[in-house]
Image: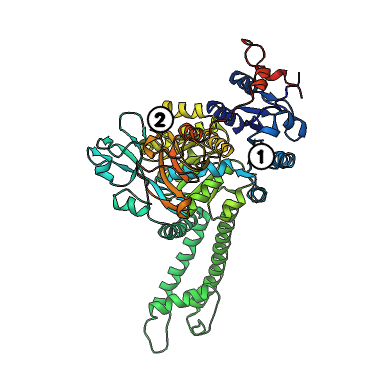
Amino acid sequence: MRADYGSWHGHVIVCGLHGVGLLIVEELSLSGVPAVVVDDDPDPRLARTLHGWGVPHVAGSPLSADPLTRAGLAGAAAVICALEDDLQTLEAALLTRELRAGVRVIVQLGNPAVGRALQGIDISVLDVAGLSAPSIAQACLQAPQEIRLAGQGFCAGRASAARAATLRELYGVLTPVAVLPRDGDVVVCPGRDHPVAPGDDVTLFGTPDELQAAGVPGRRGGAAPARAARRAGVLRQLAMSLVQAADRRLAVALAALFAVLVGSTTVLRLAYHLPGASRFPVLDAVYFSVETITTVGYGDFTFRQQDPWLMAGAIVLMLLGALFVAVFFALLTNVLVSRRIEESLGRRRITGRTGHVLVIGLGNVGLRVVQRLLAAGADVVVVEKSEDNRHLQQARALGVPVVIADATQPEVLASVSLSGAAAVAVLTSDDLANLETGLAVRDKLGPRFADTPVVLRMFDPRLAQSVRVQFGFEFVRSTAALAAPWFVGAALGLEVLSTFYAGAEPLLVARFTVTPDGGLAGLAMRDLAARTRVLALSRTSDDGALEYPPRRGTRFRAGDRAYVIGPYSELLAVLRRDRPSPQASEPARRADLGPPGAGPASPGTVGG
């Protein structure tokens, strides 16, 4: 049976079910937004999940026009291309734009150059790695997260309540975003009169100056001081690496050369006769010894007029000196070349380093996190298991030390100075490897684990929650769960600007435009859902001037650009209040569900 959803209107077509695609469909279903999936080879388990949600599936390639047409492209509100291959994603997006010029198209793409080209033809490009990197970097740095609203800079910072009081008494005009009690669940978007106890963790939003005035910790140091410290650390590391690389042979050669120099200086001091002088000066003796050992022979001193035994000794001195000097410089050259080769192959040891951020895994997410950490002035060390990783050269070009090794091994963690690390980010693309590495890091850190941020990347959001609860990892980030709301928001007209965490609760900062005939026009700020807050308004009537912070009695006007914060589900509820959720046409829905009581049609019955 070939199902046809051509009569549907206002739904979202999702091309690709693997990876983040399933989470996008789940978020659409939870939000009450009808969706149709187009995939020619879905995993049977994922197909059964779709069937359980009642989401229809068109079995066909999104690279062909027929499956897109049968999925209702003519009436779709948006098309999300979340295929695993960038080339297929690009082809599906271009085909969609060719078939219907006005539809909103959102694509998952990791290539920035191609992404910029697609944005030039009005295709929204979202990169999972780029979306998740800011929250991971912020967890590592434990510093306020920078957020820009209408070109103005704001920060979301964290503070610990110093005494029992209300948020208004402690932090004045700062906007409270979340309160995490020492014993209890996180409170999202509390009022300024919300009471807190000493030690409660409070997340606040405001300008950098407001945060500083209220005593909220700012950025640790700054980019310039951190870069200076990193340069000093590099020099220190170079010196220590040379000491560690110096093997026993080099030490023996240096000791022998030094012994010859001391012996020669002593003999010359006691036995060498200068005309008109009883003793050879010590400095002259050292100079003449070095001159003889290195076979320079400037001619200012000579053994010609000395005792025969001293002349014979000079011959032995020149031979031994030339030998030991040649051996020493040969071994030193070997050390330097070997160190350079080890550095190129990632076999070096990073010992004696402190205050650095250890990034394990150099995939797309890992590279983006490294770039953000460097931009913040952090010192970064990378551990990557595969020597064929395509991002290695890019990381090395940034001046980041890269060690090729298996980070699950305790000796590898010791070789990259885990004991002195300020934070650890475990970001491979394998959930099991991340968990195994995280547990190895926890064991190696010992008592320092409680004070050292260890960020684990997990794809499955349910597994992420279990790992957080069962193993005690505070910072577990599901990149797919972070990215899915961005895709859904972009499809529905909610532009997500930033994501950060309050405890285990992900909060989104988003922007939308109030529609003239929607449910928000004329509504006061205090009448919004309790777990959301309007951070600022950009008024079209005031030439786009930013109203910050809006008062509780301030009312939305048509055309306003509202900047809101809250959990994703609450923000979508605000958007639905402004723009009622699109629903598929009832005849098409009845045709899909079959006779009353029959349940949803199995996706396996849809032909291609």
Q: Residue furthest top?
A: 597
Q: How many C-alpha atoms fall within 10 Å of the one at disc 1: few (<14), some, or many (≥20)? A: some
Q: Nearer the viewer, mark 1 or mark 2?
A: 1
Residue under label 2, please give it: 472
**In the foreground, 171 or 216:** 171
N-terminal-most mark, 1 or 2? 1
Amino acid at pointer 2 = Gly
Question: In the image, residue 227 lies at what x, y percent?
Answer: 45, 58
Amino acid at pointer 1 = Val
Q: Quadrant of the C terminus?
A: top right
**In the foreground, 215 or 526:** 526
Question: In the image, residue 333 lies at what x, y percent?
Answer: 58, 61
Q: Is residue 180 visible?
A: yes
Which image quadrant is residue 44 in?
top right
- Pointer 1 with pointer 2, Cβ within 8 A: no
Q: Secondary structure at mark 2?
A: loop
Which image quadrant is residue 63 in?
top right
Q: Secondary structure at mark 1?
A: loop
Q: Residue furthest left?
A: 164
Which image quadrant is residue 444 in?
top left
Q: Residue at x 49, y 83 (%)?
A: 301
Compared with 89, 230 (above or below) is below
Question: In the image, residue 144 lies at what x, y percent?
Answer: 39, 47
Residue under label 1, please give it: 103
Q: Residue at x 34, y 55 (%)?
A: 209
- Per the model, the C-alpha gap separating discs 1 and 2 is 45 Å
